[in-house]
Structure formats: structure tokens, C-alpha cells
Image: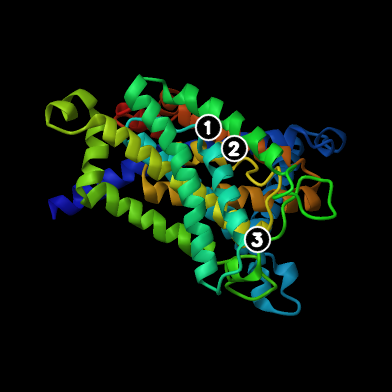
């Protein structure tokens, strides 16, 4: 009974700080929405009315955010289930974000800071696109081949970081930042070549992937949500198993906690650093494959969007744990999906969503401030947990 109680207490502590950081971000965003509404200054006659108008403005904006990310009753006139279309869009955005977030999370647990998820995502998208449009394989086999091709390309790209870190001591943060730039400009060059430039087009876009390589949609043509979300959830569970129940995962965590002690215990630190970055690259590359094969169906210059950089925030908010990463990715997917509806229904700038995301990062990165506001003790943040094993 005491073990259950202790486990529940530990779980409660694990979610306390991320929840409070999100609450403060929503509260701060609501105040920003309220004070940016011109009505609040033109209609108020008393302080009470001033506050009422401000709260109403923020409330309407957040209701629209929920309508755009979970359920919209305005879409239920023909079919009730169409009201869940916004939720399906949340899953569409969250699927590649979960995978790229896991690539950062796994690196954190091994004491590395993988800022290169953006570049690894791009290389995964390149591999998936090339196999998707260049070969004509049977259904299922074609999609599997494209996915494994993406993971191979991105895994090698990520493994290069681990190799340089292990053999030369090159700092992974600097290396991954530089490789991100290389990836971006390599993609731009690639889309100008005869192999990747779509015939009859001058803008940088590759040929569409063949239908055999596309990930199947889950609920028909009315919804964009596809098999990618289940791939992401399945992989997150496998990463949890890897970290908690395998010898290799134990080595990752040991090197992340104390590389010198791990070396003394007989573990090969260079092998761990290289192998973990290979897996991290493959995870981000799988995110790129899900994006190309499940949603975009063609490689473009902006295929990666900001997934690689959002993944860092997702991993921090998720306290560098697979389950937390999944939940954080779903939250960010909801914010991105609902932002457009919030802008359309309330004329609230979509930049407010970016502000809320930035505020979440701010409060997660400033745990002392959150503790001081709520007078908390002995509660660790995602950054503190990640930094605990970061060998820098």
C-alpha cells in the first residue's frame, strides 16, 4: 500500500510543475488577449466592466481555440462525427511532433542535447520522398520501404553527431546546429536537381509519392488523420520499453547520469553516444516520413516546418519521458490546430498561440520562479531532470 502511495505521490510531483507552467502561460496569454482587444478600452465605464470585457474577450478566444482543436459543434449539421474533425487535425500535427520530441527526449536521457532534430527530420523526409516516388512497389511493402529508408538516412545523419562527440569531443549542440543549416540548404539544392524537381514546375517541389507508399487514412477522405498517429504512439511505447527494461536503455541512462561512473563499470561511452544519436536521428526521420507519406505527399522546402525546434519544447515539457512527450506533443498539436479557428472567429492574432508556446518554455525553463509563485518545494522541472544527466 505504501508503494502505491509513494508511486502516486511521485507521479503527482512529476506533473505538477509542467501543469503549473502551462496554467501560467494560459493565464498570461489570456491577459494579453484581453488587453489587446480594442473593445476593452472603448466600451468600459467602470473597473468592473473593464475586467468583465477583458475576461469575456479571453474566454471567447479560448473557446474558439478548443473548437479548432477538439470539437466544433458548427460542423455537426450533416454528421455529428464531423464535429471531431478539429481533433483529427490535432492528431495530424501531433504525430510527427511526438516522434521528433522522442528524438530529443532519448538524447536527454543519455546526457546529450539533440538540437539537430530539424535536420534529421529533413533527411527522413528526403529518404521517404525518394523511395515514395522513384520506386513502384506493392502496397504496404512500399510504405514500409519508404519508412525504413527515411529512418536509415536520418539515423546516419544523427549518428554522425554521436560519432564526432565520441571520437573528437565535439560539442553536440554546436555540431547539430551546424548540421541543421547544412540540411536546410542541402534540401533547397536537392529540389533544384533533375531527380527531385517535379516535371513542369519551377518552384521547389518534388514529385508526389505514389499512392502505394501513402499511409492509409483512418476515417476516410473527410479526415486527414492517418496511420501515423498510431505509429507515433507505438514507437513511444517502444522507447519506454527500451529505457526501462533493456540493457541498452540502462546503458543510455547510466551514461546520462554519470559517464565516468559508467565507463568505470565497463560500459563503452563512445558506443552509447553514437548508438543513441543513431536512434534519435531515426526517430526524427520517422517523423519526416510520417509527414511526407501521411499528410504532405510531396517533399517541399518547408516540409519540416518548425517540428524539429518545437520538439525541444515538447521534450522539456514532457520532463524527458516518453509519456510526457506524447502528452506535450498533443497539447502543442491542439494549440497549432486551434490557432487558426481562434484567429478566424475572434480576430485574435494567431501569434498569440506562439506567445503561449514561448511562455510555456519560459516557465518550464524558470522553475525557481514557478516554485516561488506557488510556494512549492522539492518539485523538479523538465529542464532540471534533463540537465541532471547532461554531460554538456
Residue that label 3 marks: 133
Q: CA distance from mark 2 to mark 3?
A: 36 Å
- Give x and y (percent) for residue 204: 77, 45
| Vertical comparison of 282 with 316: above or below | below
Q: Residue at x 51, y 48 (%)?
A: 285
**Quarter of the image with the N terminus in it:** bottom left
Residue at 55% x, 54% y: name it: 289
Please give the name of the residue rendered at 34% of the width and 35% of the height, measured from the top-left corner.
274
Q: In which quarter of the view is residue 275 placed?
A: top left
Classify 10 Å Cα crowding around label 1: few (below 14), some (14-19), many (20 and above): many
Q: Earlier in the sequence, mark 1 or mark 3?
A: 3
State whether residue 308 is above or below residue 227: above
Q: Is residue 315 above or below residue 230?
A: above
Residue matched to label 2: 357
Secondary structure beneath label 1: helix
Query: Marks 1 and 3: CB-CB under 8 Å?
Result: no
Amino acid at each position: 500500500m505504501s508503494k502505491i502511495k509513494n508511486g502516486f505521490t511521485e507521479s503527482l510531483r512529476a506533473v505538477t510543475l509542467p501543469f503549473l507552467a502551462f496554467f501560467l502561460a494560459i493565464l498570461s496569454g489570456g491577459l494579453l488577449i484581453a488587453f489587446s482587444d480594442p473593445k476593452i478600452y472603448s466600451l468600459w465605464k467602470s473597473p468592473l466592466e473593464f475586467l468583465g470585457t477583458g475576461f469575456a474577450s479571453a474566454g471567447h478566444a479560448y473557446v474558439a481555440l478548443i473548437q479548432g482543436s477538439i470539437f466544433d459543434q458548427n460542423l455537426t449539421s450533416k454528421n455529428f462525427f464531423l464535429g471531431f474533425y478539429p481533433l483529427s487535425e490535432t492528431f495530424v500535427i501531433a504525430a510527427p511532433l511526438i516522434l521528433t520530441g522522442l528524438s530529443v527526449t532519448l538524447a536527454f536521457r543519455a546526457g546529450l542535447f539533440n538540437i539537430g532534430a530539424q535536420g534529421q527530420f529533413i533527411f527522413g523526409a528526403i529518404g521517404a520522398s525518394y523511395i515514395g516516388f522513384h520506386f513502384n512497389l506493392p502496397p504496404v511493402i512500399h510504405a514500409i520501404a519508404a519508412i525504413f529508408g527515411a529512418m536509415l538516412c536520418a539515423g546516419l545523419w544523427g549518428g554522425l553527431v554521436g560519432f564526432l562527440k565520441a571520437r573528437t569531443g565535439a560539442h553536440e549542440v554546436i555540431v547539430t546546429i551546424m548540421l541543421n543549416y547544412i540540411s536546410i540548404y542541402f534540401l533547397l539544392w536537392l529540389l533544384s536537381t533533375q531527380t527531385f524537381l517535379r516535371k513542369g514546375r519551377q518552384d521547389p517541389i518534388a514529385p508526389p509519392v505514389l499512392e502505394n507508399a501513402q499511409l492509409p487514412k483512418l476515417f476516410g477522405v473527410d479526415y486527414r488523420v492517418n496511420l501515423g498517429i498510431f505509429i507515433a504512439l507505438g514507437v513511444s511505447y517502444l522507447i519506454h520499453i527500451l529505457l526501462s527494461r533493456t540493457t541498452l536503455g540502462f546503458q543510455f541512462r547510466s551514461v546520462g547520469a554519470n559517464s565516468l561512473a559508467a565507463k568505470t563499470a565497463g560500459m563503452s561511452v563512445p558506443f552509447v553516444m553514437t548508438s543513441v544519436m543513431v536512434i534519435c536521428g531515426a526517430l526524427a526521420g520517422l517523423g519526416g516520413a510520417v509527414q511526407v507519406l501521411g499528410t504532405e505527399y510531396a517533399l517541399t522546402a518547408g516540409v519540416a516546418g518548425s517540428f524539429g525546434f518545437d520538439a525541444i519544447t515538447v521534450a522539456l515539457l514532457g520532463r524527458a519521458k516518453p509519456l510526457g512527450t506524447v502528452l506535450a506533443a498533443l497539447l502543442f498539436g491542439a494549440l497549432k490546430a486551434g490557432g487558426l479557428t481562434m484567429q478566424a472567429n475572434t480576430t485574435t492574432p494567431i501569434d498569440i498561440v506562439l506567445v503561449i508556446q514561448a511562455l510555456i518554455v519560459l516557465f518550464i525553463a524558470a522553475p525557481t520562479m514557478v516554485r516561488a509563485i506557488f510556494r512549492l518545494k522539492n518539485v523538479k522541472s523538465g529542464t532540471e531532470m534533463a540537465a541532471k544527466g547532461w554531460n554538456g
